[in-house]
Image (spheres, rainbow, N blue to C red):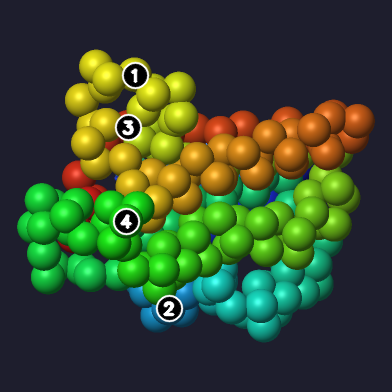
Amino acid sequence: MQYKRIALVTGANQGVGFQVSKELVANGFTVLLGARNLQRGEAASKEIGPGAVPLQLDVTDRVSIATAAERIHKDFGRLDLLVNNAAISNTRKGSLSLQEYKKITLPSNVSLDEVRAVWETNVFGVLAVYQAMLPLVRESSDARIVNVSSGVGSLTTNADPAYSHRAFYSPVYPASKAALNATTLAMMIELEPAGIKVNLVSPGFTKTNLNVI
Ligand SMILES: NC(=O)c1ccc[n+]([C@@H]2O[C@H](COP(=O)([O-])OP(=O)(O)OC[C@H]3O[C@@H](n4cnc5c(N)ncnc54)[C@H](OP(=O)(O)O)[C@@H]3O)[C@@H](O)[C@H]2O)c1
């Protein structure tokens, strides 16, 4: 029987995560489509077809993460690829223009609730999923972890006055991705001795629901 690689993609029911899942399935993976809303995960899996398996997974919910890890353990016993893709850019969906949102997310006036909500998903969510899934990743003979970041979180790029998006660097989404980058480096260092590569990727600007303020 052919060896099927097992992948988990968080936030896989739409956008970049959906497309990544589709391409992984086309490349022979069995892909667990993590979705905080199981029905959306089921619909996305159905659209992709055989090889796509819906999995309820809210990266901000400890019970959901633990239940997902338990199910993967029971059904597959390992994870060959973990893609930490789920993220949010703000909590205001559809209520403000980009310029208006920028005005209320300066370090001097940003709501700490807004910062916490975004960091909860983009930083703590990734770390929580990493911790829960790592024992399964260690069971693979050829494991990889991919954390989906963003160019707007690069400290080097934003330190350059010529960078076009610099005016939008804020403690909310951009700084959450900077914190994710920093946390990923710690994961890379931790897993170096085990030969497990942890990669950071940025898909570049893509028209998805993430870019709705
Ligand atoms: N689009 C871009 O231009 C761009 C650029 C650079 C980097 N990125 C990165 O690419 C990744 C994917 O973004 P996208 O553009 O595909 O965004 P998207 O279309 O908004 O998709 C985000 C996905 O994350 C899920 N999600 C949000 N909160 C979650 C939670 N608590 N638990 C589990 N899933 C959750 C969403 O679920 P629901 O459907 O339930 O909301 C959705 O499936 C993100 O890490 C983003 O930062 C995107």
Sequence-wise, the earlier of marks 1 and 3 is: 1
Q: CA distance from mark 1 to mark 3?
A: 18 Å
- Report the residue marked by disc 3: 204
Find residue 195 and report its horizontal and vertical position in percent: 85, 29
Front residue of this view, candidates 194 and 33: 194
* Mark 2 secondary-structure assignment: loop
The answer to whether residue 136 is seen in the rendering is yes
Sequence-wise, the earlier of marks 3 and 2 is: 2
Sequence-wise, the earlier of marks 2 and 4 is: 2
- Report the residue marked by disc 1: 160
Query: Type of residue at label 4?
Result: Ser
* Mark 1 secondary-structure assignment: loop
Left or right of 80 on screen, residue 206 = left
Farthest residue, direction right? 193
Query: Type of residue at label 2?
Result: Asn
Sequence-wise, the earlier of marks 4 and 3 is: 4
Find residue 186 and report its horizontal and vertical position in percent: 74, 39
Near mark 2 (Cα within 10 A), the count class, few <14, some 14-19 or many ≥20, is some
